[in-house]
Image: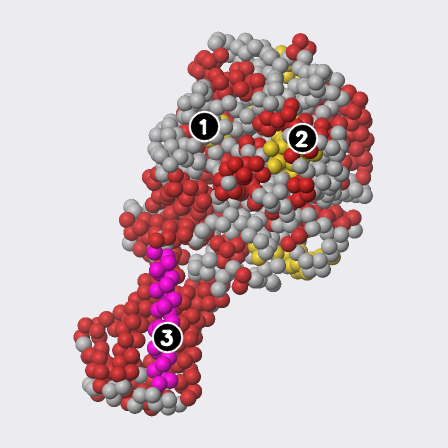
Amino acid sequence: MKWLIDLFTSTLGKKLMMALTGLFLISFLVIHCTINAMIFFNDGGETFSYWGHFMGTNPIIRTLEIGLVAGFLIHIIQGLLLWRANLAARPVKYSVSKAPANSTWYSRSMGLLGTLLLLFLILHTSHFWIPNRTNQFTQGEELPLYKMMFEVFSNPWIVFLYVIGCVSLFWHLLHGFASTFQSLGLNHLKYNGIISFVGTAFSIIVPLIFALMPIAVYFRWID
Amino acid sequence: MKLESKVPEGPLAEKWTKHKFNLKLVNPANKRKYEVIVVGTGLAGASAAASLGELGYNVKAFCFQDSPRRAHSIAAQGGINAAKNYQNDGDSVYRLFYDTIKGGDYRAREANVYRLAEVSVNIIDQCVAQGVPFAREYGGLLANRSFGGAQVSRTFYARGQTGQQLLLGAYSALNRQIANGKVKMYSRTEMLDVVVVDGKARGIITRDLVTGKIESHSAHAVLLCTGGYGNVFYLSTNAKGSNVTAAWRAHKKGALFGNPCFTQIHPTCIPVSGDHQSKLTLMSESLRNDGRVWVPKVAHKGLKAKEAKSITETDRDYFLERKYPSFGNLVPRDVASRNAKMMCDEGRGVGATGLAVFLDFADAIKRDGKDTIAAKYGNLFDMYKQITGDDPYEMPMMIFPAVHYTMGGLWVDYNLMTTVPGLYSLGEANFSDHGANRLGASALMQGLADGYFVIPYTIGDYLANIGWNDKVGTDHPVFKEAINAVNSSVSKLLSIKGKKTVDEFHRELGLTMWEYCGMSRNAEGLKTAKKKIQELKNEFWQNVNILGSASELNMELEKAGRVADFIELGELMVDDALNRAESCGGHFREESQTPDGEALRKDDEFTYASAWQYQGENQAEVLHKEELRFENVKLTQRSYK
Amino acid sequence: MKITLKVWRQQNANSKGQFKTYVADHVSSDMSFLEMLDVLNTSLIKKGEEPIHFDHDCREGICGMCSLYINGHPHGPQQTTTCQLHMRTFKDGETITVEPWRAKAFPVIKDLVVDRTAFDRIQQAGGYVTVNTGGVPDANEIPIPKKIADEAFDAAACIGCGACVAACKNASAMLFVSAKVSQLALLPQGHAERKERVEKMVAQMDAEGFGACTNTRACEAECPKAISVTNIARMNREYFSAMFSSYEVKVGGGGE
């Protein structure tokens, strides 16, 4: 088993973990985003609540959720460790650096964007996921998420923070999506174009839908 | 002293095979009891160190650069010759041998050259097996090109970076032995002396360039693979660090120096742009395959490349095509260089300095299209533009000859041993294979031939004969003396505290050498040069200024030691050039030319290799002659008309 | 031209360094950057000040010895080596900051000279094909498709200068290591050892203290030989497939 330890303690192995968990989280975003988009049926939250209930109670989904939490933790912890190790690889910094000439700012700022996302995640889960699951465990019943949404998003500051979170997500994905494939070694002239296209489209569409939710609620585009 | 070339008897084609059989072998179990020192890690040094390590010897390898991969072999562009005859165009070992002997103007040893041609085929196999990415055809087999005017396509190449790829191959083999513990690598370490005890080479003295520590290393044999001495001219295509120090200090310890005056001037280099110039950049000879060399028929002072179009076709003198209709722009290097110089001497040179000729691709671009030319020479054109700011697609290049290679070097016998037993010299550092002029794509061949396929056989004979317990430790008084001598010469350099920098002396030496001992030489000029060099030497030891200390990284101190040796070598080159009152290959004595200005060899008087013996500080060196016997080729006057 | 230079001066590995400012008058636009430093050094020596130490050798862009982080770029603002950078790239009166490569694995030796032997140790860990001299098959025995040979060459063109490490915000050596791994993974001659090779070279790379790759592609943008990050993806692929399918190998680590 030494090989497995060697693998996951190597710089390449750490990147592998980042990529695999990243892909997993991307797949989570697809589902999360799809269900969120149900609010735009504007049916008083009926469709949204139906699927919310399904996700919150289906035993398979509940089991997968453990994996999701693990995925988040690995992605976050490994990301922070890599960030620290990468900083240590250059103990003395340059006094003049023209990094913008050779790379994009967001590719160099994944640690920062990730940290912003982590803060957002704490805020966001404290609004919905944590109280809901806590209630499920203690009381055995779900909270009315659709209704809670209207309460939370009545505060313009919260709406603003959610939008900031979505913008961070956009930049994080814009680099992260394609980067994942590179880390996994999936780089091929024939497919690079499509990866880059899908990556960019994904990074725009998903955060946009997420961001529209608090905005739509705040401005009462839906009720 | 009698020079014994140790060339084996028998027919030319069987000499090496027979010799290999007659050489003594070292028992495999005993090989680990021997230590061998290899100085220099270019093609010759890296291949030798790796091969000897593979055989089981304990090797210590030294280079002054920060990594063995930096050795200047890396800069060779064009390619490597091998008599593979993959192109079915009439090549053979004998033809490669013949071309090399003839190209060298009959001043090389037949047997050595034949062996070189013979092992050339193994080199390509070896390099391919190491993963050297040679150019290939679409069918997957190796591609060849004709190079340097050869009538057959026998040159293997890896774009314009053949030297780099071959060196990285040898470096990888060396790395494997370092990892195996068979080679111990000392980088940023310079050899400053050879230690000779009881007439045999027993080790070397080195300086750790980072800490300044002077150390001794003992071994059963010492291999000097330290390259050529073109930097004696200050401006050359050599790397800035290339130097003669190891060879020169060995010379002072008894190794004879062969044919020092034989230097090769390469015709296609980027001209000097100003006094700040620190080195010259070679443009691959392959450019002459499509480029046409010309100057205006009448002098146009300061003609710029972008003004070249204003000179009409009828006002241009394509002088190589005019004078050598059958070879045209593809005449050998020495002929092309000399003719360029003649044009400039006539005042028809171009550019701000008047020391340049045009190399024009306009016709080739018109004929083949820009894309074809870009595919062949794109990287060279880019390089030219980067350095000069001119775009060769739009205007002709300007070129001028520059010192490129030195055929002379430590005299070695057929076994590559110098006149000091146990001291070998490989690659450009020795004098052995190229006579008075080296053909294109032959330097890489010789370096690797010596390292991979000659020394592993010949060194065994010497080692088996002396026996593994014939070794002197570094505690021997001679080592101690040598350390003291090196220390005191280092302190002496630092104590002078004069007014001139090392570079200023080097530049001055270079100007003298280029002026009097460069592309053409005459007795009077050479005598002037000798006097100037002696004066320069005196001044150097009184007026050089080196700051810093000996116990740290001190690049001025490193340079100073090298320049001091170059000055002494310069004098010997002049002596040798003066002695050789004939023109041959790269050595053109104005007194010896045909009525139409071509080089005139004097075979009756000069069919020998000169080997000079050091006699002591400021003493005239003694000349020994190794008569060259040609049993297989007939000496003819080269003609490219 | 008149150029103001801010140059990092550091007596040795253990001392603390600082920037010193010099003014270079009479700079010709035809000078290479290193020639400009040569001229400056001559004037420093004349003034009794120790010359600026920097690594250089071939001065034709192939040996990889020259370094220098110039105005925020390894090898300066053009995608070439410092020795091929010419002063015509700069404006009259410009201030140029010159720093050594900065990486934990490349400690400063003096002034602008750094120790890059970590690269040698990575190559020693596996950057070779195990063949002894002699006894190899004929060079044309194994045909290699031209495209593969060309791609291997593109990777093999690496000069080992370390600009990739210098450019990377993580001081990662992935581009350098992947170039060698790629070359030998592409060519059939390297296939016998491809798994062990990549495992050992990556282990050594990590042991030297280089950072991880975050795919910013700064290395590719600054590499004087335009080595592509495709090689890094190839190395990742080689590494993962090796780790999951090779026999377990012991890999050494750590510098000397």
What is the chain identity of the residue bearing mark 3? A
Q: What range is drawn magenta here? A: A191-216
Q: Mark yes or no: residue A155 visible.
A: yes
Q: Residue furthest left?
A: A59
Q: Is C113 left or right of B522, judged from the image as shown?
A: left
Up/down of A15 relative to A31, above or below:
above
Which disc, if any, is residue B317?
Answer: 2
| Crowdedness near tag 3: few (<14), some (14–19) or many (≥20) residues, C-alpha within 10 Å | many
Residue B448 at x, y percent in the picture = 50, 29
Q: Is A190 left or right of C207, judged from the image as shown?
A: left
Q: Amino acid at mark 3?
A: Pro
Which mark's residue is nearer the viewer, 2 or 3? 2
Q: Residue at x 42, y 63 (%)?
A: A82
Disc 1 to disc 2, C-alpha distance: 42 Å
Up/down of A178 relative to B35, above or below:
below
**Mark with earlier residue (1, 2):** 1
Q: Are marks 1 and 2 in contact (CB under 8 Å)?
A: no
Q: Residue at x 41, y 52 (%)?
A: C230
What is the chain identity of the residue bearing mark 2? B
Same chain for labels 3 and 1? Say yes or no: no
Residue A76 at x, y percent in the picture = 38, 69
Which disc, if any, is residue B45?
Answer: none
Q: Nearer the viewer, residue B50 or B260?
A: B260
Judging by the rendered image, the residue that carries numbered circle 1 is B123
